[in-house]
Image (cartoon, rainbow, N blue to C red):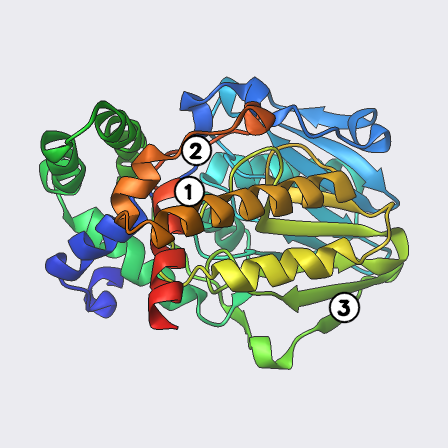
């Protein structure tokens, strides 16, 4: 039924995959230590209330909990999330990559609170944040998201469920075969390495679409859980469907993938905006210095995590601009890019998800001007 509603051609999907690279976040292929270089807040790391190996839940405030993934121990959650509750209700954040991940989070909520769950919010449509929605739906929970999320899920994942593996990996295999340099070959190999796991995950998942849709033009939305005000806000940057959940009184932000803590930004999405994302990070940087940010990936952090990602963006813009002015094509410039020594501990999920699309988008912006 979902496939009939999608209306997406195989040609369009394969073209999208050229932009999307390998979809991202099967980060188990990357060292877990790469995410430990942005210092975590002490109050975040000391109070673990549940640990499933693949993720742990930590208390970060009164009625505020963060679910932090450790993909080196399993890929049931993949991304980070969390939940908030007061005396009148609770809100879960993220559907994760599998139903098992969503179940772990909901079970933990029920261990620490009797507040009824009002719903679960997807911060955006990407698979590692939404494929576990079926578990929440089976429990009768409303699934909240940006109003564009259902269509983006349908466009991205229904065609994948119709394809065989050979057709799916063909674009990356062609990139490897056509690579003219060793660096280009290695980058394409790294992108391809992620494909199989993503394909298998999507193939075996029942897609469950959000049913409480939030119009970004009508945000922020204030929710009273019976303890403290909670804001749902919309910001530009990562996917065109990005929402955050903020508890201003306790200075806690569930940032989704608008924040990669200790990692290069993932900019592959067709709706990703480099300029918009940098403006969003500039806004985040104006918030209280003691604000705790729960990122979509990596360790919770304070303003040092925001500054690191801003510095990485500055570095990418600077290097891309040099290549642009030198007349080097965007793809070649991206393959020539070398992570500088100052960012040697900052993870790169895959070249085709972070470096290549960032260069391509910047070149396109400059060309349009």
Instruction: State how far apart marks 3 and 2 are (Cα).
Output: 34 Å
x, y (%) of residue 106? 63, 42
* Circle nearer the viewer, 2 or 1: 1
Residue topped by disc 1 = 354
Residue 43: quarter of image: top right
Q: Which residue in the structure is indicated by mark 3?
A: 223
Q: CA distance from mark 2 to mark 1?
A: 7 Å
Residue at point 24%, 56% (across, down): 16
Q: Are marks 2 and 1 in contact (CB under 8 Å)?
A: yes
The one of 291 and 323 positioned closer to us in this rendering: 323
What residue does disc 2 label?
Answer: 349
For the residue labelled by badge 1, is the local secondary structure a helix, a strand or a loop? loop
Residue 11: give x, y in percent of width and height.
Answer: 11, 59
Q: Is residue 335 above or below residue 277?
A: above
Residue at the image point whose x is 86% and y is 43% from the top? 61
With 193 as the anchor, is 75 left or right in this view? right
Q: Secondary structure at mark 2?
A: loop
Q: Earlier in the sequence, mark 2 or mark 1?
A: 2
Q: Dot 3 surroundings within 10 Å: few (below 14), some, or many (20 or more)?
A: some
Snapshot quadrant of residue 214: bottom right
Q: Residue furthest bottom?
A: 218
Say above or below: 184 vs 118.
above
Image quadrant assignment for residue 122: bottom right
């Amino acid at each position: 039924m979902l496939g009939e509603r999608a209306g997406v051609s195989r040609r369009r999907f394969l073209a999208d995959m050229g932009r999307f690279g390998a979809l991202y976040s099967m980060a188990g292929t990357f060292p877990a230590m790469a995410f430990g270089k942005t210092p975590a807040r002490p109050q975040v790391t000391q109070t673990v209330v549940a640990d499933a190996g693949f993720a742990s839940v930590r208390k970060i405030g009164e009625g505020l909990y963060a679910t932090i993934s450790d993909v080196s121990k399993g890929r049931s959650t993949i991304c980070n999330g969390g939940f908030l509750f007061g005396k009148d209700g609770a809100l879960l954040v993220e559907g994760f990559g599998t139903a098992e991940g969503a179940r772990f989070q909901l079970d933990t909520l029920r261990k620490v609170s009797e507040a009824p769950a009002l719903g679960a919010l997807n911060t955006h449509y990407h698979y590692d944040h939404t494929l576990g929605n079926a578990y929440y739906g089976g429990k009768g929970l409303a699934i909240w998201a940006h109003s564009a999320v259902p269509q983006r899920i349908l466009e991205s994942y229904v065609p994948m469920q119709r394809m065989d593996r050979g057709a799916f990996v063909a674009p990356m295999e062609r990139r490897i075969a056509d690579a003219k340099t060793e660096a280009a070959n290695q980058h394409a190999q790294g992108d391809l390495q992620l494909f199989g796991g993503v394909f298998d995950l999507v193939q075996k998942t029942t897609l469950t679409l959000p049913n409480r849709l939030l119009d970004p033009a009508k945000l922020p939305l204030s929710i009273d859980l019976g303890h403290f005000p909670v804001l749902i806000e919309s910001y530009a940057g990562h996917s065109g469907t990005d929402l955050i959940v903020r508890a201003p009184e306790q200075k806690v932000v569930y940032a989704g993938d608008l924040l990669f803590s200790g990692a290069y930004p993932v900019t592959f999405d067709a709706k990703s905006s480099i300029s918009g994302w940098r403006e969003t990070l500039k806004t985040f940087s104006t918030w209280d210095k003691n604000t705790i940010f729960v990122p979509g990936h990596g360790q919770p952090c304070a303003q040092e995590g925001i500054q690191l990602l801003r510095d990485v963006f500055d570095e990418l813009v600077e290097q891309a601009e040099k290549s642009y002015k030198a007349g080097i094509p965007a793809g070649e410039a991206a393959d020539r890019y070398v992570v500088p020594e100052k960012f040697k501990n900052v993870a790169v999920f895959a070249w085709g998800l972070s470096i290549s699309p960032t260069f391509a988008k910047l070149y396109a912006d400059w060309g349009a001007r």
